[in-house]
Image: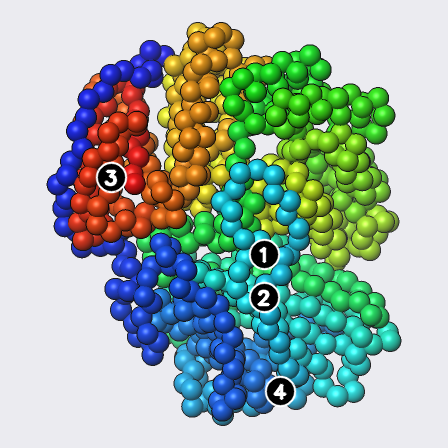
Amino acid sequence: MTAKSLEFGPMKRALATVCLIGLAFAAGCRSPQEAGRSGPRAAAPADWLVTPGPYKAAVEADAALGTLRLSNGLVERTFRLQPNAATVDFRNLVTGETMLRAVRPEAVVVLDGRSWKVGGLEGQAEQAYLSPEEAARLTANLEAFGFRGFRTGPIEERFSWKRRWPDEGRPWPPTGVTLTLEFAPPAGRLPGVSVLVVYELYDGIPLMAKRLVVRNAGTAAVHLDAFTSEILAAVEAEASVNTPPAWDVPGLHVESDYAFLADSPKTASRATTVWRPDPAYTSQINWPRETPCLLESRPPLGPDQDIASGTTFETFTTWELAFDSTDRERRGLALRRMYRTVAPWVTENPVLMHLRSSDPQAVRAAVDQAAATGFEIVILSFGSGLDMESEDPACLAAMKALADYAHGKGIEIGGYSLLASRHIDAATDVVDPKTGRPGGAAFGSSPCLGSAWGEAYFRKLRNFFEKTGFDLLEHDGSYPGDVCASTVHPGHRGLADSQWTQWRRITDFYKWCRARGVYLNVPDWYFLSGSNKTAMGYRETDWSLPRERQVILGRQNIYDGTWAKTPSMGWMFLALVEYQGGGAAATIEPLSEHVGFYEAHLAQNFLSGVQACYRGTRLYDTDATRAAVKKWVELYKRYRAILDSDIIHLRRPDGRSMDGILHVNPALPVRGLAVFYNPTDGELAETWTLPLGYTGLTDVARIAERDGRPESCRLDRSFKIRLPVRLGPGERTWFIIQ
């Protein structure tokens, strides 16, 4: 593939108005109103992914039955309140299926060395299912924390968010309802101590959250050794007499904000989400009784925290999202809606440049180029020479002058700082509990955030932002969950509290950034604690491969990365200058000599709604190159709302056939935007089936290629249309759907 082959050529195409009748909704799954139900509730009236409005969260109390029902029409959790409070049903209202087979405590806390159940009911004879009649006969454990009352209210923000960038305008805090259950220990035990079990249920999505608050109103401190904030005896997803190589788990995505060393929802949930066998479930058909059907959410270590008199301790939050389908795309849409709902800052998506120099003249030149092309942030990248840990007044003044210059041009400015993946010294680095010596960290060596160095590091970063007015932090090697066996670091006592205290330090800092409006690029899964963006997912050394290979690989990375991420949640990369080798065959510089490849990256990034780290010394070198960059930025900004919306995956790039994606958003005037690419050196023609169910269109779509005249097309009863696309060698095009 040559540079020339990646440039646009003339294209003539026609829009089909013929539709095919299909048998499935959208991408092949049933809409909620069509789904069969096995439970007593009425069928959901609309697809919540298209029309979330009808699904309002509420708490209903039934005094006659002694129950509370937490429901939003999509998911429902029911509690019996006597003789103790416990969850007795957890139902997916879209499918009509219960997700609960047995009763467990609401939580378990270990206080002053003793394990206490919080709530719960006992005496269930059969653990495979729970009938309403048996639920009414269950008894209380007199040695458990007992139910004392409940209260409800609106959802409160977990921390402040200062909006500074274009976003979807989602509410913060999210709309919904909070239900708080209060429990106290048996009489005469742990005087003044109580445990609050706090649920949040959100409007318009089958999602709830849960956390614990341990309150100490007594006269003496108590020690929280450990806790389990969620215990669900769930209906198994797979029944097998023999033990399979890998088990299916129930259709419930469980994830907490106690997350680190992660790049996806799956890896983010591994720290606290545990699906394990249930020894009480003796009637399961698996012979060794190893079916993973007991959910626990708990920290892997500690927290090992003192709760002083008159204070409280709050656990991490666990979110539980009920899937209503096994379809991969629908599950991905649900996950992305979850992040848009409970971490809406992820919808901020500024246009980024990574500058490889912190020299004032180079920074001003880059700011000027950003202003000329429509870029929005200049980041002083790794290797630029920026030192965000400096407290030298002259250095801070120089950086403030650069920030003032950028702001005067309407451009924001940010910087790079490395944290965890580096060695400081023996007194600072985490101590391996296996050897008693520094080392053994996720990245080999890493500073302990509870060390004196760690305390100073975060003070210096705060000072840098306050003194300079910088707007973004690229925080590399964020805290990866390392434990530390040191007993002399001022920020923790020893091994048992080392993970909790380090996680609190990093997340408190990120929340400070979110409240200040500092944009956070963090190559880890800290979205639920305030970060904006992580890597879309790519191999860094691939940017040293020949240019033509980078194009296809980059588009594959975007396609793969957006199954669980919104386009705005992941950054891509483009090495304008040499990066990790590769020489002249790999680099885009000189830009004017490789403008076709440059445009190919600009096009596939912006048409995917994905921002990239354009890393180099400049954005353009000639008027023609400037015009090319500006063209794609302007196109992105013209359709920003729909391009930042969710992606329906049509076909993964394979280098041999046409590939494409479809952006959808039923809340916008532009309901969809389909993009197609021809990666080959020959002409390709194909008729695509576009699933428009998630656009909210039901009868007629008006479709225009690029800025052409719209044509009307009638949707079939599976909400699909047939669209012919013809592309010349290396060409790309897009269709606007209204």
Q: CA distance from mark 4 to mark 2?
A: 32 Å
Q: Dots 4 and 2: beta carbons under 8 Å?
A: no
Instruction: Report helix, strand or loop for mark 4.
Output: loop
The disc placed on residue 173 is: 1
| Percent of width and height locating residue 82 | 57, 88
> Residue 130, percent across and down?
43, 82
Of mark 4 and mark 2, the one earlier in the sequence is: 4
Q: What residue sits 55% from the left and 70% below the top?
A: 231
Q: CA distance from mark 1 to mark 3?
A: 36 Å
Q: Is residue 58 above or below residue 245?
A: below
Q: Are marks 1 and 2 in contact (CB under 8 Å)?
A: yes
**Looking at the figure, which quarter contains the N terminus?**
top left
Sequence order check: which comes first, mark 1 or mark 3? 1
Query: Does dot 3 land on a helix, a strand or a loop?
Result: strand
Disc 1 marks a residue whose amino acid type is Pro
Task: State the image coordinates of residue 66 (x, y, percent, origin top left).
Answer: 52, 88
Q: Amino acid at mark 2?
A: Pro
Instruction: State whether residue 697 appears in this view.
Output: yes
Task: Give the mark nearer the N terminus: 2 vs 3.
Answer: 2
Figure check: 630 above or below 441 = above
C-alpha separation, residue under disc 2 versus residue under disc 3: 40 Å
Q: CA distance from mark 1 to mark 4?
A: 37 Å
> Residue at 38% across / 18% down in the picture?
548
Amino acid of disc 3: Arg
Q: Which residue is mark 2?
A: 154
Q: Which numbered mark, 3 or 4, is in the foreground of this view?
A: 3
At numbered mark 1, what does the secondary structure look like: helix, strand or loop?
Answer: loop
643 vs 425, nearest the viewer: 643
Q: Which residue is mark 3?
A: 702
**Total numbered circles:** 4
Mark 1 neighbour density, 10 Å: few (under 14) some (14–19) many (20 or more):
some
Of the numbered discs 3 and 4, the one sitting upstream in the chain is 4
